[in-house]
Amino acid sequence: MDNPGWNGTFNGKVLPSDDYWFSIKLTDRNGILRERKGNFSLLRNR
């Protein structure tokens, strides 16, 4: 796998280890709006 993935920054700033929640609105091919919610834990090694 050549892609290292996300580097844990947002707007150029390093985010701290924490739990993060998100909500995203997606429009499918038929124009139907769907909302998805989720969370993840960002863990950093010291």
Image: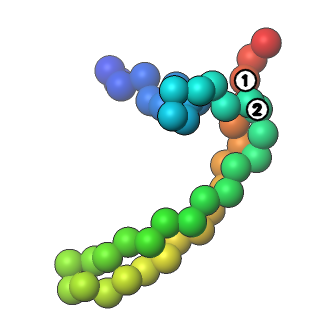
Question: Relative to the observer, which residue lies in front, 3 or 26?
Answer: 26
Q: Residue furthest left?
A: 29
Q: Amino acid at mark 2?
A: Ser
**Is 10 displayed left or right of 1 in the figure?**
right
Rendered image quadrant of residue 9: top right
Residue 22's x, y, as percent? 61, 59
Q: Residue at x 44, y 29 (%)?
A: 5
- Element on which disc 1 rests: loop
Q: Amino acid at mark 1?
A: Arg
Residue 31 versus residue 9 in the image, above or below? below
**Callout 2–callout 1 Cβ contact below 8 Å:** yes
Rendered image quadrant of residue 43: top right
Residue 45 versus residue 14 in the image, above or below? above
The label number, if any, that marks residue 17 in the structure image? 2
Q: Residue at x 44, y 72 (%)?
A: 25
The total number of labels drawn is: 2
Question: Relative to the observer, which residue lies in front, 28 or 12?
Answer: 12
Looking at the image, is mark 2 or mark 1 earlier in the sequence?
2
Q: Residue at x 75, y 17 (%)?
A: 45
Rendered image quadrant of residue 27: bottom left
What colour scheme has been applied to the protein in the rendered image? rainbow
Instruction: Classify mark 2: residues with Cα within 10 Å, few (<14), some (14-19) or many (20+).
Output: few
Residue 1 versus residue 42 in the image, above or below? above
Quadrant the N terminus occupies = top left
**Is 26 displayed left or right of 23 in the figure?**
left
- Residue that label 1 marks: 44
**Is 15 displayed left or right of 27 in the figure?**
right
- Element on which disc 2 rests: loop
